[in-house]
Amino acid sequence: MKFISGKVVPEISHLNIFIIVVIALFYILPLSSFAQNGDWERRINNKAHKIDGHFNFVSLQDVAEALNAQTYYSNKARKAVLTLGVERITITAYNPYVVIGQGVLQMPINTQYSKGELFVPVKFFIPILKHVLQNSGAGNNNISESDLIKQGVNITGVQVVEKTNGTLIRVNTLTKFNKSGISTRYSRRWLYVDILNGKVSDKYFSAKIDTGLVKRVVPVQSEQLVQLSFQLNKDISSKDMFVTQHENEIWISIPTKNNLSRNIIEKLKSDKEKWKIDKIVIDPGHGGRDPGTIGRSGVYEKDIVLSIAKRLKKLLVKKLKIDVFMTRDKDKYISLKERTQLANKKGGKLFISIHANWNRNSQVKGATTYFLGLAKSDEALEIAQLENAAIKYEADEKNYTQYNDESIILATMAQNDYNKESQDFAAVVQKALNKNTGINDRGIQQAGFYVLVGASMPNVLIETAFVSNRKEERLLKSSSFQQKVAQAIFESIKTFKVKYESELYIN
């Protein structure tokens, strides 16, 4: 199979085979051999209409609704993917070829396209559907709610309905979720809805979307939650979204931008200015009575990272001419909570906590950049526990007794406005560190660092190198290496700032 200029074209040597298979599907195989479900077929036929006075066509969206299936559209490529069980059916506008997995079938006539929708010929597309349903096991989507619940599924789909005064998103659920476990965020024409303890199944998730604000929905299942990602066709005011919880639905209402007051429209413009990265908060880890990790030669982590932080501030002020704040600029103890509180108070746009690493194995080396989330590796968990142990220097450790796994999940959700940006920034930092210093790249990871909890901005924690490794300890003590690390972080900030701010103004 080849793709030429957005069109699916089968290999010439296989064309005859494809046509023979299609003829067999259409005319030779009896309908009784296909998965029988007259209801969905009847619904598709009821929605069909003639185009150009010849064959009956039906929109792919109507097909998806009849089958309770999921569709993904690319209006730019004029392609769509219909998911039936484990099979993906790809249809292209004005093209007779239908891609099913790795195979291709040819219909006798082309598909049609109008006003952003793909239309398929009913007479020739229904046999294809029956064939796929029979072989994918997706024909019976009429599973009972109790069976879905037994499988752990509690979110079955979404409906997006356009109203005269805005858009209503209805998330269909099989249970009532705790309101504190539902969070929303909006970033550059993507609306994210996170539902703690939510479970979806690709096989039984359906999306019905009216033409309007929402372009598509992408459900993403993680271990602790479901993230429903809605790609939008235009900007919205996230401040005016309203979430309500019903017995078997979650409603997200979004007012139409055209109906917003001039004040709100102006606020949308000012919101973009608000996200400009013009204030950086640098957090040199530890300090004062908290030395951090201690190298074999007796060097303190707190001194190394303070030197790197000062060098970084100098570069930022001189070359980017932006406001830079430090949580400490001398050997002083600052609690973990106070660090993010200061960052928020100063209106920081990036929070960067700088550290040096330690490991029992003196051979371990390299740099890692972390963002907030539950640790997914033993190493990340151990590093987070090591850094979080700084609370023992505080007057009252009880301030952190509620920081368990669940609270870290909720904190991550609360900071979801910045979580994706934090991951993106972490990747940029890692690349720059590896390029500028040449030390081992240990990648980006997530972990529950207390110092990142509550930061109202993209935030990362950088473990620059290992003081427990003799070679890297010598490097960390040297002025030249400290300058290289500072330069790497500076370049990553500059790169991220240019990319991030340019995306804010894409219409």
Image (cartoon, rainbow, N blue to C red):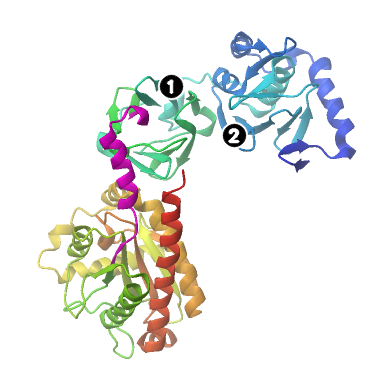
Is residue 146 depicted above or below 101 in this figure?
above
Q: Residues within 10 Å of mark 2 (few under 14, many from 20)?
A: some
- Kindly identify which numbered label has been placed on residue 339: none
* Horizontal side, residue 51 vs residue 423: left or right: right
Return the residue nearer the eye: 286 or 309: 309
Q: Which residues are magenta?
A: 253-281
Q: Secondary structure at mark 1?
A: helix
Is residue 31 depicted above or below 328 in this figure?
above
Q: Residue furthest left?
A: 395
- Which mark's residue is nearer the viewer, 2 or 1? 2
Q: Residue at x 77, y 29 (%)?
A: 105
Q: Closer to the N terminus: mark 2 or mark 1?
A: 2
Q: Residue at x 78, y 13 (%)?
A: 30
* Horizontal side, residue 355 vs residue 3: left or right: left
Which residue lies under the disc numbered 2? 75
Is residue 350 depicted above or below 23 in this figure?
below
Instruction: Let me know if residue 262 is in the magenta part.
Output: yes
Q: Quadrant of residue 237?
A: top left
* Horizontal side, residue 353 vs residue 100: left or right: left
Return the residue nearer the eye: 7 or 323: 323
**Three-letter code for the amino acid on which mark 2 is drawn:** Asn
Q: Quadrant of residue 467?
A: bottom left
Q: Position of residue 453 (x, y in %)?
A: 26, 56
Return the residue nearer the eye: 110 or 375: 110
Which residue lies under the disc numbered 1? 145
Q: Residues within 10 Å of mark 1 (few under 14, many from 20)?
A: few
Contact flag, marks 2 and 1 (Cβ < 8 Å):
no
